[in-house]
Image (spheres, rainbow, N blue to C red):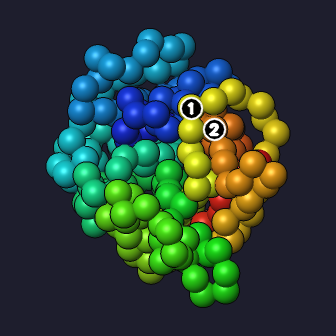
């Protein structure tokens, strides 16, 4: 499959890139600094600006799937959606955030007592991004939210999937970037959450 990853040099993007490369896909890794992208089989690194719709669309053209792994505060949802549509790519998957997940009926994590102020702006931007996606009819989109603690850790391939509610386990709400990447790659290969958000955690 021909897949483009926007933000491929970040922590989530690089793990997704590694997972999909190991599965034999043809990948275009897009980043502001492509020299930071590790050389992998089937991977072509390209320089791209997430706020340049025309330039991004040119890089995305010819792919079957686009995965966006960029910070919400560093990007513009309309530019990203416009670039994917302009490129004619039918499927758009997004590395989401945990802030918009529910911890109780109608209560988002980002609105719950004790949510760290340092993460509020990014979490709010992620929630707004998801709200905009839910209005999108032209693209087959999927938004994958990690658990609250998104950390550098081992690839265990042992995790649970959920919907709009925050997943918690004995050690809290956690998922490693490596295991998150498995869930994202599985969704690319076997779509099960068309025009929906889902989440992954231990």
Against 11, is 143 above or below? below
| Near-viewer residue (134 or 155) | 155
Side (left or right) of 5 relative to 22: left
In the rendered structure, find residue 152 and report the number of the disc placed on it: 1
**Mark 2 vs 1, N-terminal side:** 1
Image x and y of residue 182, in percent: 68, 38
How many labels were placed on the picture? 2
Task: Report if residue 128 is visible in the image.
Answer: yes
For disc 1, the neighbor class at 10 Å (few under 14, some 14 to 19, many from 20) is: some
Q: What residue do we see at 29% from left, 17% from top?
A: 35
Residue lying at 34% horizontally and 33% vertically, measured from the top left: 30
* Relative side of 83 to 123, left or right: left
Question: Which quarter of the figure is the N terminus placed in?
Answer: top right
Residue 50 percent across, percent down from the top left: 25, 47
Q: Which disc, if any, is residue 77?
A: none
Q: In this view, does 165 lie to the left or right of 35?
A: right
Secondary-structure class at tag 2 = strand
């Amino acid at each position: 499959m021909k897949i483009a990853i926007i933000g491929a040099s970040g922590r989530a993007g690089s793990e997704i890139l590694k997972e999909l490369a190991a599965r034999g896909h043809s990948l275009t890794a897009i980043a502001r600094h492509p020299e930071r992208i590790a050389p992998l089989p089937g991977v072509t690194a390209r320089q791209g600006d997430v706020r340049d719709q025309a330039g991004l669309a040119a890089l995305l053209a010819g792919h079957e799937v686009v995965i966006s792994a960029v910070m919400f505060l560093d990007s513009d949802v309309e530019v990203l959606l416009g670039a994917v549509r302009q490129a004619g790519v039918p499927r758009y998957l997004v590395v989401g955030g945990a802030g918009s997940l529910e911890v109780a009926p109608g209560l988002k994590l980002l609105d719950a007592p004790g949510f760290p102020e340092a993460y509020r702006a990014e979490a709010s931007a992620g929630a707004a991004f998801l709200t905009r996606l839910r209005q999108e009819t032209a693209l087959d989109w999927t938004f994958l939210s990690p658990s609250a603690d998104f950390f550098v850790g081992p690839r265990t391939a042992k995790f649970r999937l959920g919907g709009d509610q925050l997943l918690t386990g004995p050690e809290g709400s956690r998922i490693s970037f490596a295991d998150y990447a498995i869930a994202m790659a599985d969704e690319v290969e076997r779509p099960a959450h068309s025009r929906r958000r889902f989440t992954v955690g231990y």
